[in-house]
Image (cartoon, grey):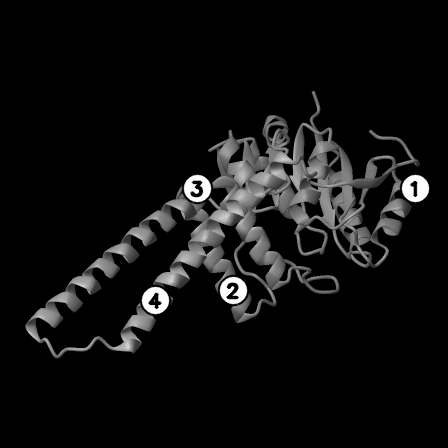
Amino acid sequence: MEKKLSFVIPCYNSATTLEAVVTGITQSFDERGEYDYEFVLVNDASTDGTFEVIQKLCETDARITGIDFAKNRGQHAAIMAGLAHSTGDLVFSIDDDGQTPTEAMHSMLEKLDKGYDVVCAYYEKRLNRTPFRRIGSKLNRTMRRWLLEIPKGVRISVFFVAQRFVVDEMLKYKNPYPYISGLLIRTTDRIGNVAVVQKERISGSSGYSFTKLFSLWLNGFTAFSVKPLRISTFVGLVSATIGVVVAIVLVISRLVNPSYVAGWISTIALTLIIGGITMFMLGLLGEYIGRMYISINESPQYVIRKIAKGTFGKTK
């Protein structure tokens, strides 16, 4: 039986790139004629007319479904919405900027046939990245690998193809802070990788600001790992130990030299260090509690304003 593919594309301010992305994938897979497929295009409350472009695409191909968010919820929430509306046996998650090489998708499908549940692509070299972004990405990968306990040699990304049962399991996650890497790694350990060459961006620039990247980073760590809390316990213990040692040193100094006067600078420094650590840990604990509170209130991952269905042509 022929397997059906779903191409889930989260879209944000991609009015100038989206049509080229869809056309490239359509031409590539139509030439081979191996699969039936569909597109699920999710507009994450863009401000440049992206959903209008999606609606026009729907008018040209019945295989396209467009989803319009009422509020910007981020790439990972958009992917979750796309997964929820996909019907394929194998589901791709693809970027909307045109930098994803279409030919890599065929390699990913071949890799999937070797017994993997998920195949993630990774770029051997990132184009047009500032030193700050490169350092931040490397730090993020290192921290993510440790906190999420990603197996050595495995790379997780939002450019992936997954078996249907993996998607169905991911969709059981209903909390308002989805993190795709965490959902993939907690679902299966049969994750393969394919190295790909990143294409030049068709137009525009990345929509990820430092604030958005930090928020995404925080989502993954607070939603899928308790290690930060364990770190806070360890740091608190070390801080208390240092405080005791300093107190003992001060007492001994006073006994050995009665004229010894403890300096105000050292006292203030210790107070600031310990106070800073305490406030940081309280903030971390508050982040966990706040997210629990929001989840208990059943805040939605996303709100859909409108769904556009393809109205022209017939599926295969």
Image spot of residue 207 (x, y percent):
69, 60
Camera-near label (4 vs 3) is 4
Helix, strand or loop under label 3? loop
Q: Residues within 10 Å of mark 4 (few under 14, many from 20)?
A: few
- Spatial CA distance of label 4 from label 3 is 28 Å
Question: Which numbered tag is attached to residue 59?
Answer: 1
Quadrant in the picture for the C terminus = top right
What residue is disc 3 on?
226
Question: Which numbered tag is attached to residue 134?
Answer: 2
Camera-near label (4 vs 2) is 4
Helix, strand or loop under label 2? helix
Q: Tell me: 252 left or right of 184.
A: left
- Upstream in the sequence, badge 4 or badge 3? 3
Helix, strand or loop under label 1? helix
Image spot of residue 182 (x, y percent):
53, 40
| Observer-nearest of 299 and 28 | 299
Looking at the rendered structure, the kind of residue marked 1 is: Glu
**Answer yes or no: do the residues labelled 1 and 2 have beta carbons within 8 Å?**
no
Name, please, the residue furthest toward the front. Answer: 258
Looking at the rendered structure, the kind of residue marked 2 is: Arg
For residue 246, say whether it is visible. yes
Q: Tell me: 152 left or right of 35.
A: left
Looking at the rendered structure, the kind of residue marked 3 is: Val
What residue is disc 4 on?
271
**Answer yes or no: do the residues labelled 4 and 2 have beta carbons within 8 Å?**
no
